[in-house]
Amino acid sequence: MSGIIGSRLNVRGSGLVSKLGTDGQVLTSAGAGIQSAFEDVAGGVSWQAVETGSTMTAVAGNGYPIDTTSNACTITLPASASNGDQIVFTDYARTWGTNAITIDSNGLNYQGDDDSYTVEYTTDGQSVNIVYSGSTNGWIPIEDDTVTYVPTKGNEEGIFAYGYDASGVTAVSNLLSNAGVVATDVTGVGTARQEVKACEYGGDKGICGYGLDASTYTAVTNLVSNAGVVGTDVTGVGTARRSGAACGYGGDKGIFGFGYDGSSFYSLTNLVSNAGVVGTDVTGVGTARQYLAGCEYGDDKGIFGFGHTGSLTGVTNLVSNVGVVASDVSAVGTARSTLAACGYGYDKGIFAFGWDGSSRVSTSNLISNTGVCGSDVTGVGTVRQYLGATQYGGDKGIFGYGGNAPLSMSNLVSNAGVVASDVTGVGTARYGLAACSFN
């Protein structure tokens, strides 16, 4: 198919099925009598194996899960069709927003237009149910719904990685079990560096990114598999910097934000796709700063909070479920920097520890499932800064390592947001490290 791109939209109401025209206007393609065209639709469809190719030919009566993780897919419809023929396509891996599907109507009309039009579906989690209505309108989408990402109970395991030990930067990592037990050192992979940040992506994997190696600011990233294996360096994208923050959003994507490059504070961000691909710089929103923290809340949203702008701050910035950072929310709790944050209880978060301008603290602040930051909670555990934090066990969290002089202790967070006393450290004592979960 060639011609003008016009993604189809299903507009419900008054029995009409409509589309977006080439100049943006909505054009009606069928009237109130449309129901009679579908009276003979056979009940159910025959679901096929997951389709991963860049092209495929659809057959009437079938349903197709389309996985576009690695490539876009062009779907050719049957060259002939009978009234009531039905085909269903669904976004198997929630990647149509990255790699779209294109439908070639193969000589027949699609929603009233001939096949000189290009029909694309470009929304993560979308399913398209089409029925053939006759030669005039041809194939018509009777449903093109987007399924909201359904959160699981959360990732079970986690990892602490990178940092600065007693002798310099390191890439060593330590796995975290689903019971909150930190394991011994795993030999480091990738560029040794400190003040790295990490978040989840793809629902069950993680990514570590940015930081300062022995002398250079970097944007390099390292993917973490769903078995906790750290990958080799991926060439950096975006502004090289350290001491920013990272969190998940949208259920299966992530975001790196803020930081410092040796001369300037930033509020810019870089989105991470559900395939672990880091995007180019997005213009910053909110107070430019470093030494802040970030975590998820409300199942599919995130929050950045606290930090250092030249002076300490307690402001927060919410991240929507499409990765849009909001303007500053007035500070609640003690302004501080070099703290950490993680999720707990499926849909809430916690900020804890850090430096308040005169001393290290263990103070914490709970984040509700609507992104509201609570007032200070008296600290538990050794006061420290430059630590890492992640969720584990589906609904719990952990703060680990840190210090000023390197430490290796940890503090578990219950699914009610209660921080426990110190657990004796395992692995190389260090600070300025990253942490994230995987499953």
Image (cartoon, helix red, strand yellow):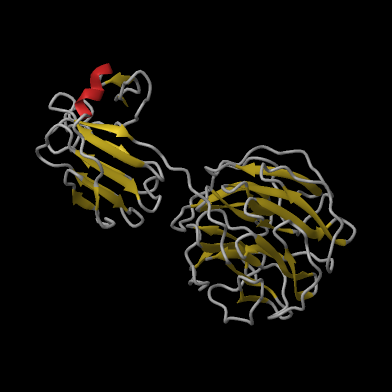
Q: Residue drawn 84% across and 64% down? A: 380
Residue 241, percent from left and from top = 62, 58
Instruction: Give the image quarter of residue 20.
Output: top left
Above-or-below relation of 111 to 203: above
Residue 216, percent from left and from top = 62, 66
Do we see residue 203 in this rendering?
yes
Specify whether 386 is left or right of 223. right
Residue 93, percent from left and from top = 39, 53
Specify whether 108 is left or right of 329. left
Please state which of residues 20 and 314 is positioned toward the viewer in this rendering. 20
Specify whether 6 is left or right of 313. left
Instruction: Give the image quarter of residue 339.
Output: bottom right
Residue extending furthest left? 80
Q: Residue drawn 68% across and 62% down? A: 397
Instruction: Give the image quarter of residue 86.
Output: top left
Q: Residue drawn 89% across and 61% down? A: 359
Do we see residue 20 in this rendering?
no
Please state which of residues 12 and 258 is positioned toward the viewer in this rendering. 12
User: What is the total number of numbered labels drawn onto the structure image?
Assistant: 0
Q: Residue drawn 56% across and 47% down? A: 300
Residue 298, percent from left and from top = 62, 46
Above-or-below relation of 10 to 217: above
Please state which of residues 250 and 186 is positioned toward the viewer in this rendering. 250
Specify whether 143 is left or right of 42. right
Q: Quadrant of the N terminus?
A: top left
